[in-house]
Image: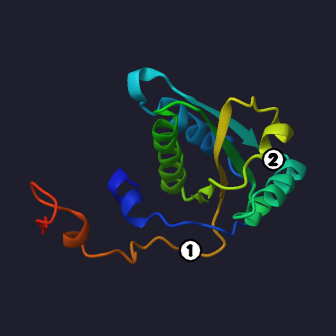
Amino acid sequence: MDTFESVRTVLAVRAYQDKPLPAEAIQRIVDAAHLTASASNRQPWHFIVVQDKAMLKKLGELAATGPYVAQAPLAIVVIAEDTPRGLSDTSRAIQSMVLTAWSDGIGSNWVGFAGMQGLHDVFGIPADQKVIAILPFGYPVKPGGKGKKNRKPIGEVVHREMFGRPYA
C-alpha cells in the first residue's frame, strides 16, 4: 500500500484477532519509529515493545481509555523526554508506526495522554520521562479502512494564503 493510501484509509482499531504478528512486521513497526525524523536529530523518545500476555493484560488494566490493549498481540509503550520538542517528535514516530503497521494490514490506535503515571513503576521508566501513549497492534477483527471518514469539508480547515480564505 502506498503512503497516501495508508493515510486515506487508516482507522482506529480497538478489537484484534487472536493471531500473532510476524517478527518481520514487528521489526518494520519498530524501525519506522526509530527512523522517524526529529528536530536537530535529538530523538527524544523511547519505545518499550510488549508481547508478554500478562504484561499486555496489565497495560489494559492501567490504560483507562484503552482496556482493549489487553487483547492485542503486541503493544508499544511510547515515552518522550520532557522537552519542548519531545511531544512533537514522539508524535511523529507514533504516526510512522501506525501507518507502517496499517500498510501491512495491522491495526492500531493511540491510547493515552491521561492516566499513564502507573506505567512508570511497572516498566521502570525514569521520572523525568513522560509516557505519551500505548499503541496496541494486531490484525483487526472487522475489516475496515475503505477511506470513508467523517471529516469537515476541506474548505473549513485548509486555508489559502491566510486564515479564513478557503483552500478549495
Q: Residues within 10 Å of mark 1 (few under 14, many from 20)?
A: few
Q: Is residue 137 above or below residue 8?
A: above
Residue 118, label in figure: 2
Quadrant showing the N terminus: bottom left
Which circle's residue, 2 or 1, is located before the other in the chain? Answer: 2
Residue 167 locus on image (x, y percent): 13, 64
* Residue at x-position 61% and y-position 76%: 142
* Residue at x-position 60% and y-position 37%: 30
Helix, strand or loop at mark 2: helix
Residue 143, label in figure: 1
Residue 93 locus on image (x, y percent): 50, 40
Q: Which kind of residue does numbered mark 2 sit on? A: Gly
Q: Which kind of residue does numbered mark 1 sit on? A: Pro
Residue closest to the eye, 124 or 25: 124
Residue 114 locus on image (x, y percent): 66, 56
Q: Residues within 10 Å of mark 2 (few under 14, many from 20)?
A: few
Residue most extreme to the right: 54
Along the horizontal axis of the image, is 76 left or right of 82? right
Spatial distance from mark 2 to mark 1, Cα to Cα?
Answer: 33 Å
Question: What is the quadrant of residue 153 in the picture?
Answer: bottom left
Residue closest to the eye, 8 or 163: 163
Residue closest to the eye, 99 or 28: 99
